[in-house]
Image (cartoon, rainbow, N blue to C red):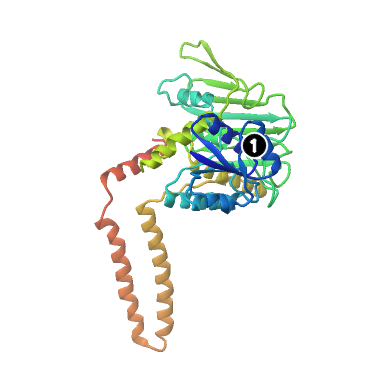
Amino acid sequence: MRFALFGDHPDGFDMARALVASGRHELATYTGPPAGAEVLARWGLVVRRIRDVEEILADPSIEAIIVASPFADRPAHLRRALQSERHVLCVHPADQTPDSAYEAALIQGDTRCVLLPLLTECLHPAFHRLAELLAATEGPIGTLQFLQMERGSADAVLIASGGRGPKASLLGWDVLRTLGGELAEVFAFAVSDELNPDQPLLLAGRFEQQALFQATYLPGSNVIPWHLELVGMLGRAELTFPQGWPGPACLRWQDQAGQACDEQWDTWNPWPTLVTIFEEAVAQSSRRTNPGSALGRQGRVRGLTWQTAVRCLELDDAARRSIERRRVSTLEYPEASEEVGFKGTMTLVGCGLLWVSLLLLILSAWVGWIKWAIVPLLVVFLGLQLLRWMVPGSRESRTENIQADHQRLGG
């Protein structure tokens, strides 16, 4: 597969290098600063440097695009790459707000091409091992009750979003969702009234599965670069990266017999794993098959999809609101279904009916008989409400909704 590279973000460079190293892909063109072309040349990747993005998109031999543009240009380049019906890999975050991510998801739904974010932390085998320990029915940890994460760095520990404002993005949302599922409430407390990459940050909240979490971000401190602790109903587990991400990792927990267990991982290179995920997604899209939901059992995230990037941006937005307003931000994840669409439509029809009825009442002061037109309007509206009961949903969808409600209530 021939692909192009937009921009010189380090994650984009690493992904391009991993794609070429697989021997199955070729970097054809590059658009960005001349220094980026020199870096690629040192890696043995001699490619054409084209300044005009539209010229690259006009080449029919380009099948995929890596969007690693500067932050100010990233949303526009992402949109154009998707509109050109290419497979797209985009550096995270795509924008300061989730709006561009929503738009990208809509375009991808029309083109049916692959769209993936360059998020790698959640792919680490240590987190998948922790998820297995939590998912086990009678595992050593049991049901998750509390998650505590601490991240320190000699530099900033947030993603600074330059270009159009001082907003920053948080690292680790994908890890939290991998272990605990979707987040229901977020409370963030910072020194100032906005996220600042150079200031400490305290993050707390609750998962939809009722477990609690706490995350601490400590810039300018590398005493404990990366520490994660899980507390379950049966035990606890501790994961540390003594040399920081993505260095060696150590996982410790106790089994059912009370014996201490530990597993070790060497320094991990995430990019070959992301190449495999990308190739599998391309193969699925070529077969026009549904890659599946982003959520597996127990509400935990399965794999990497564009929904991961969307959720991270939504959670960034919720954390910013919490800091500005000094209160908890509640997240709602409405599901797009026939029932939800019907309720929304009926709400709009009902509001319109109220305004029409008010207008008819006013006009009845001059034309007395016109007020009786309100009666058939009410009859029609009530008749539309009966349609929901006359055409019930399938038994399978009802069962899934009942089970989802049962799990949400903790039953």
Name the amino acid, label 1: Pro
Which residue is more in the foreground, 107 or 161? 107
The x, y position of residue 273, in whole percent, is 51, 29
**Which residue is pictured at 35% across the width and 76% down the height?**
374
**Residue 98 visible here:** no
**Which residue is pictured at 53% across the width and 33% down the height?**
19
Number of disc labels: 1
Task: Report which residue position mark 1 lands on.
Answer: 10
Q: Secondary structure beneath disc 1?
A: helix
Residue sitting farthest toward the left: 390
User: Splitting the image into 4 quarters, where does residue 213 fall?
Assistant: top right
Q: Please rate how many residues cluster around mark 1, counting C-alpha atoms within 10 Å: few if below 14, some from 14 to 19, many from 20.
A: few
The x, y position of residue 207, in whole percent, is 51, 37
**Which residue is pictured at 53% across the width and 21% down the height?**
236
Q: Is residue 166 left or right of residue 145?
A: right
Which residue is more in the foreground, 31 or 198? 31
The x, y position of residue 183, in whole percent, is 52, 39
Which residue is more in the foreground, 9 or 305? 9
